[in-house]
Image: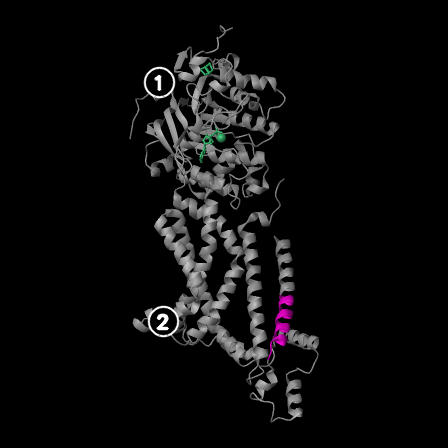
Amino acid sequence: MTTIAPKKALTDVVLDVRDLEVEIAIPHRPVIRPVRGVSFTVSAGQRVGIVGESGSGKSLTALALMRLLPPRARIAGGIAVLGDRDLTRIAEGKMAAMRGGRISIVYQDPMSSLNPIMTIGRQITEAITTHEPVGGRAARAQAIDVLADVGLPQPHRRIDDHPHQFSGGMRQRVMIAMAICTNPDVLIADEPTTALDVTTQARIMEMLAHIVEERRMGVLLITHDLGLASSFCDDVNVMYAGRIVESGPSRDVLRTPSHPYSAALLESICRLDSDVDKPIAAIAGQPPLPHQLPSGCPFHPRCRHARDMCAAEAPVRTTSTGREVECHFPLEQLPPR
Amino acid sequence: MFKYVIRRVITSVALLILGSMLVFLLMRIIPGDPTITKLGGSIKDVDAQTVESIRSELGLDKSIPQQYLDWVSGILRGDFGASYFSQFSVTSLIEQRYGATLLLAFMAMVIGTLIAVPASVAGAIWQNRILGGVLSGFAAVGIAIPTFVIGIMLIIALGAELGLLPTQGYVSFRRDPFGSIESTLLPALTLGIGVAAATMRILRPSLVDVEHAPFVRTAKGKGLVRRQVVVRHELPNASIPAITAAGIIMAHLVGGAVIVEYVFARPGLGSLLVDSVYQRDYGVLQTLVLLAVAVFIVTSLVADIVLGFVDPRLRTQAVT
Ligand SMILES: Nc1ncnc2c1ncn2[C@@H]1O[C@H](COP(=O)(O)OP(=O)(O)O)[C@@H](O)[C@H]1O
Ligand code: SF4
Ligand SMILES: [Mg+2]
């Protein structure tokens, strides 16, 4: 097992992901690498976002951290240190103890993500008793409390209801309750509100913000919605074709995007302010598929600022004033106001 | 839930009435005159008056709807009518014989479930290609091989060669429960293999389907280990199609029981059925066929009620 120098004591980092790579090998097809060296950290109480178009590798990154990748996918490189354990290397038995205990995930689809024939109470108490040495009654009391925390009305009465008796928004609250009931260090939320209407989305994000603040939980919010990410997160990572192309404090990235892709994402929101549902379709062209990555900078076929060099050579990461960018020609950054 | 049960009971009763009509009509359509059978196979030496008196004794001189009504009202009073052949009433014939069949069916069901469920669960937990192949092979072979072949093979292997278990006859349960179970073990195993194969054919694909359901991913995300995920989440959901098909599995079992009783020389309802076919004993035959239909319908009804308990979506309103 790899142990990493105690960075934690200084900065309170709970999750340290470095150069994470995910490979998918489907028989009779070329091996693809949809996640190609992703690095970021999450500290206690910090909210970190990963933003990018559909297909950029966000969900695979999340599933890799949970070690719940689909059958043909595997972690091909990098490390992901939670506390003092490298999640990419620990044995499956140890990983099971981490899942739901130290690191939890909430998925996009609240409709099918709950077991339809088990009461929500049993589904939550199951998560509690798997990780904590408590009896059934104590777990039930804990479940009622956490359901109240996520804003489920009358939790003591509704705890014995089944998933189909709840609306989509309420089901997602139940999913969140299940994910946080053990007080994990990191909560991954993969498009948690994408399946919900805008009003419900706003209420749930508000509730989530409140809870993680209270419990000082680190959050990794995965979304295609730059607006949502920047309003919720402290830091954002903009992801394109399996790599993080820009990262920094969300306020800065939003105000002065440095990577042309971030800028394009941002523009698409501003332009289509009313149509929140499909903001990113506004960038011309399609994101590349993992098995046909463009040469050089993968964004160059769609980039307005691309020059000859961009197709020839992949840009390297540069750092300046808390911002990391992977571009040959970062946009001129306005002096801070 | 209550409404749902009432609705299912009403449809079951309707099905039963329809079934009884079909059974009755079928008996009238098949060739062969029971009067002749009763007279010993030939009508030549008998005068017309004797034939008439036998016909009226059996109620065959009445119109067919009248005969049907007589039969049904008799059944409702617990009187299944007279055997056309022997001196006994159908009721007493069934009373003598049902014990052997009931014990056989029950034990076959238990053995079948005890094979099918753990085997399917093991297949889902280990997902080993060799184990999966063995299980699929067992299910395919168990369904394809006729029950009597399995029976004879078991008789040869366990009964005749090793002398472990009795291969013929039946000891009454009331007289000697242990001996009764012992005498039923081999036939029940024969039948149970078929039941297990039929159950596995439904349960295993449904376990594979449910494995990719998002709620299974949620269960893994909680930190459950594979065994817990399969037993607590996959199996209960995957059992829904198997419960739905319980009527079909039961039909398999009833059909198999007839053959097994014959092979193992058990004095049960199945061998009674075979005898009554040979003797063109309509009185016995129609009752037994109706009984088989009733078993199928009642099993389906019970399965649907069980399903109501397993699947809450059937008994409570969804939020939309
Ligand atoms: N199970 C899989 N089999 C094959 N390819 C996959 C699989 N899952 C994801 N991919 C590919 O990996 C890429 C990234 O997928 P994903 O991480 O789901 O993207 P995102 O969550 O950002 O929308 C996609 O291009 C997709 O085609
Ligand atoms: S490297 Fe070139 S193509 Fe890539 S984003 Fe920067 S300017 Fe555009
Ligand atoms: Mg995704």
Residue bearing mark 1: A10
Q: Position of residue B114 (x, y in %)?
A: 41, 59
Identify the chain of the residue marked 1, using the numbered disc in the image: A
Which of discs 1 and 2 lies nearer the camera? The answer is 2
Amino acid beneath label 1: Leu
Q: Is residue A170 magenta?
A: no
Amino acid beneath label 2: Ile
Q: Quadrant of residue B261?
A: bottom left
Answer with left or right where residue A94 lies relative to residue B258. Answer: left
Instruction: Determine whether the residue tagged by mark 2 lies in a helix, strand or loop.
Output: helix
The secondary structure that most of the magenta stretch takes on is helix
Q: Which residues are magenta?
A: B16-31
Which residue is found at the position 46% from the left and 57% from the top?
B199
Asked if marks 1 and 2 fall on the same chain, the answer is no
Which residue is found at the position 53% from the left and 40% from the top?
A112
Label of residue B155 in the image: 2
